[in-house]
Image: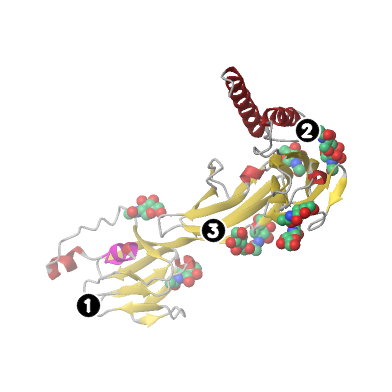
């Protein structure tokens, strides 16, 4: 709107006319070339022209085509009208300006002694508009991906791509085509295309890329449980699409709600829950996670925990600690329990020694 108001206010006028009206005199240098009027597509343009007197022969031309000759309309275009309400005015009004209207317009004034022409160049501006953008896609990790974002507008909009992701580093790409070679899981997410020119606020659209990859173990930890108590083993993976889980105990598949074991899977995390542990429950468990791109597994242990009320805790604890050193190669973060066990054992050992010395 701002452009329209500023640029559409009169451009052309006779020096004599302005002087006559008492308006500020604007000296029109006919040699300097053309005036430009910038107008937004769809708005109404008014090309001002004033004549010396009523006897002059006047005409408006669009390039070399006559639109009006005097008051006779030659153009068939209904959007074009003459404005003659003001004194000696002979202005051209074009409604619903379109891109095809861009170009030179001439107001030709034929007085007997001073034939003059006023030329004005109509420049049509169009707000940026994205008219073709890639749809959301799902690809496998390692694929090459090309996103496209095509926009029109006048002046030609600048296209800009951005990866909307707090975890990923930002990419700034001034291209209609965004090429991603060997896409990684970290490049998944929303990509925003922005088309901007100075005419109006930028147009923005988003494309979502889903990157599939095989499960990778994020977390799998051994645990211990006392007989009769409840123990849990957790196994967490990252995977797209989400993984399906299976649990095995020494190569035998474990099914949900059998052998006193529940399996609970929430999103990418599966938990094996033993309520009322028995001797048969202790041992080596394997969590297997798979999706259509691959399978992975981790082996973790459910250890027997000796409750502190049992007599001679020192010996039992040392036995448990030794056990934890046998943790399988698949167990991911098992140092926690092991260290805790050692610390407790040492503490109990010291306590026993102190007790022996003081004969308690
Ligand atoms: C009109 O615009 C053209 C480019 O579109 C420019 O070269 C010319 O200088 C402009 N004329 C005036 C009077 O602003
Ligand atoms: C000016 O001429 C062009 C083609 O020469 C045409 O497309 C356009 O509609 C015309 N505009 C007006 C306002 O007469
Ligand atoms: C969008 O652009 C792409 C690449 O140039 C082209 O293959 C596709 O046909 C276009 N789609 C539409 C709806 O124009
Ligand atoms: C991805 O592009 C690179 C470089 O152009 C090419 O070497 C590779 O084979 C492409 N990968 C696929 C999966 O098309
Ligand atoms: C693209 O994906 C996003 C996020 O998943 C979703 O909000 C949007 O509706 C999708 N767009 C299309 C065209 O499917
Ligand atoms: C196992 O069974 C319980 C109910 O017996 C159910 O709540 C749970 O979702 C099941 N787990 C799986 C992985 O199907
Ligand atoms: C746990 O199992 C033992 C032996 O099978 C049984 O005697 C006991 O009642 C069970 N306890 C609970 C709470 O189910
Ligand atoms: C676990 O993975 C190893 C190597 O990837 C494989 O040899 C083994 O068979 C798998 N175990 C299970 C239970 O899937
Ligand atoms: C645990 O079981 C898995 C699968 O049967 C096996 O690959 C792994 O070697 C076992 N770990 C130990 C420490 O026995």
Rendered view: 67 above or below 262: below
Span shown in magenta: 3-12
Observer-nearest of 28 and 211: 211
Which labelled disc corresponds to residue 328? 2
Residue placed most toward the observer, 32 or 138:
138
SS state under label 3: strand
Residue at position x 80%, y 50% from top?
246
Ligand 9 closer than 8 Å to the CB at disc 2?
yes
Q: Position of residue 227 (x, y in %)?
A: 74, 45
Mark 3 surroundings: few (<14), some (14-19) or many (≥20) residues within 10 A: some
Q: Does 27 sit left or right of 190 as displayed? A: left
**Image side of residue 178 versus residue 201, left or right:** right
Among numbered discs 1 and 3, the one appearing first in the sequence:
1
What residue is rendered at 65% in x and 34% in y?
Answer: 337
The total number of labels drawn is 3
In which quadrant of the rendered image does the N terminus lie? bottom left
């Amino acid at each position: 709107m701002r452009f329209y108001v500023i640029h559409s206010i009169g451009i052309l006028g006779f020096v004599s006319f302005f002087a006559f009206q008492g308006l500020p005199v604007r000296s029109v240098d006919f040699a300097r070339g053309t005036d430009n009027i910038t107008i937004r597509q769809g708005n109404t343009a008014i090309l001002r022209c004033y004549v010396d007197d009523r006897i002059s022969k006047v005409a408006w031309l669009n390039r070399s085509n006559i639109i009006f000759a005097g008051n006779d309309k030659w153009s068939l275009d209904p959007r074009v009208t003459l404005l003659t309400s003001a004194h000696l005015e002979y202005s051209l009004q074009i409604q619903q300006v379109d891109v095809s209207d861009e170009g030179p317009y001439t107001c030709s004034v034929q007085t007997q002694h001073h034939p003059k022409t006023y030329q004005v160049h109509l420049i049509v501006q169009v707000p940026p508009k994205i008219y073709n953008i890639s749809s959301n896609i799902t690809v496998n990790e390692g694929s090459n991906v090309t996103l496209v974002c095509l926009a029109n507008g006048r002046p030609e909009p600048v296209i800009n791509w951005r990866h909307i992701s707090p975890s990923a580093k930002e990419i700034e790409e001034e291209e209609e085509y965004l090429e991603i070679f060997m896409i990684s899981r970290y490049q998944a997410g929303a990509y925003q295309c922005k088309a901007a020119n100075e005419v109006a606020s930028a147009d923005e659209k988003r494309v979502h890329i889903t990157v599939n990859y095989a499960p990778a173990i994020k977390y799998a930890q051994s645990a211990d449980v006392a007989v009769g108590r409840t123990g849990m083993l957790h196994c967490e993976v990252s995977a797209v699409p989400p993984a399906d889980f299976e649990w095995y105990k020494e190569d035998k598949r474990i099914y949900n709600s059998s052998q006193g074991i529940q399996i609970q899977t929430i999103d990418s995390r599966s938990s094996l829950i033993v309520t009322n542990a028995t001797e048969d429950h202790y041992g080596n468990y394997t969590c297997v996670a798979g999706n259509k791109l691959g399978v992975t597994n981790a082996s973790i242990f459910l250890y027997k925990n000796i409750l502190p009320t049992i007599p001679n805790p020192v010996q039992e604890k040392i036995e448990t600690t030794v056990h934890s050193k046998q943790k399988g190669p698949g167990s991911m973060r098992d140092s926690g329990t092991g260290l805790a066990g050692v610390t407790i054992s040492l503490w109990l050992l010291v306590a026993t020694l102190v007790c022996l010395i003081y004969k308690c």
